[in-house]
Image (cartoon, rainbow, N blue to C red):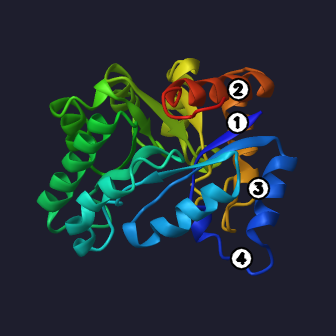
Amino acid sequence: MLIDSHCHLNCLDDKSSTLDDYIQRSLDNGVTNLLCVCIDLDGFSKVIEIANMYSHIHATIGIHPNSAPEQAEKIDNVFDKINDEKIIAIGETGLDYYRTTKDLEKQRKLFARHIEISKSTNKPLIVHSRDAKQDTVGMLAEYDAGSVGGIIHCFTEDIDMARKCLDLGFYISFSGIITFKNAVQIQEVAKFVPLDRILIETDSPYLAPMPHRGKPNEPAYVKFVAEKIAELRNDEFENIAKCTSENYFKLFSNNIKEI
């Protein structure tokens, strides 16, 4: 059993494959559950449509920090949809100071609102952080995000940030980046994080792992992430698959009706 804890199925646009093709290939590679992550409210209808098409797919709702500024004004519309049983998390939210260098206060306010919604609905957060290590950790602590917890997705920072996020009660998720030759820092983090706090993801269609780097990513490729973590930790692939799947269900035990 493998679980892709973060993918954007609504963004897969390879004309040679249908959504059913992607799903079947993931099942053929042992991927039994997927979390389809929303990045803006305009795209939410497609995200939830996909989740409702397949019993083993769940969804999130949220606004990515790099989404258009006018999206921030729609954040409270989340409450109109939050009770759908397929929605198990809030996000993708967080801070990105790499792509966006202006209006950073707007990002922080939007992130804070997501945390409030997460706490009020008891749905874990899906957190994006890029070049914003200090502020991300600071806001998670300031707003008591650990009381509901969540995932630091596509982790690309150092052991210091990982330790602080773990202390706040968050899980650390690794993507295909961990398979890149130059990803030494991330690989060290993967060896550091306790196995009961690790998740795996594709972030597809982005960040395809080796040996597919540079090509569109898809959920079936999450196995390469698990294989690399097993190699780094001198562990068995089957154990990494088992433990990361158990971690996923533990995190979402209050939100997934049937496990």
Residue bearing mark 3? 211
| Distance between mark 2 and mark 3 Cα atoms | 20 Å
* Disc 3 residue type (three-letter): Pro
Q: Are marks 1 and 3 in contact (CB under 8 Å)?
A: no
Q: Are marks 1 and 2 in contact (CB under 8 Å)?
A: yes
- Which residue ends up furthest to the right in the rendered image? 28
Q: Which numbered disc, 1 or 4, marks the residue closer to the eye? A: 4
Q: Which mark is residue 226?
A: 1
| Distance between mark 4 and mark 2 Cα atoms | 30 Å
Image height of 10 relative to 6, above or below: below
Q: Which image quadrant for residue 74?
A: bottom left
Residue bearing mark 4? 14
Q: Position of residue 249 (x, y in %)?
A: 59, 28
Q: Which mark is residue 240?
A: 2
Q: Residue at x 50, y 34 (%)?
A: 255
* Disc 4 residue type (three-letter): Asp
Sequence-first disc among 2 and 3: 3
| Distance between mark 4 and mark 3 Cα atoms | 18 Å
* Disc 1 residue type (three-letter): Ala
Sequence-first disc among 4 and 2: 4
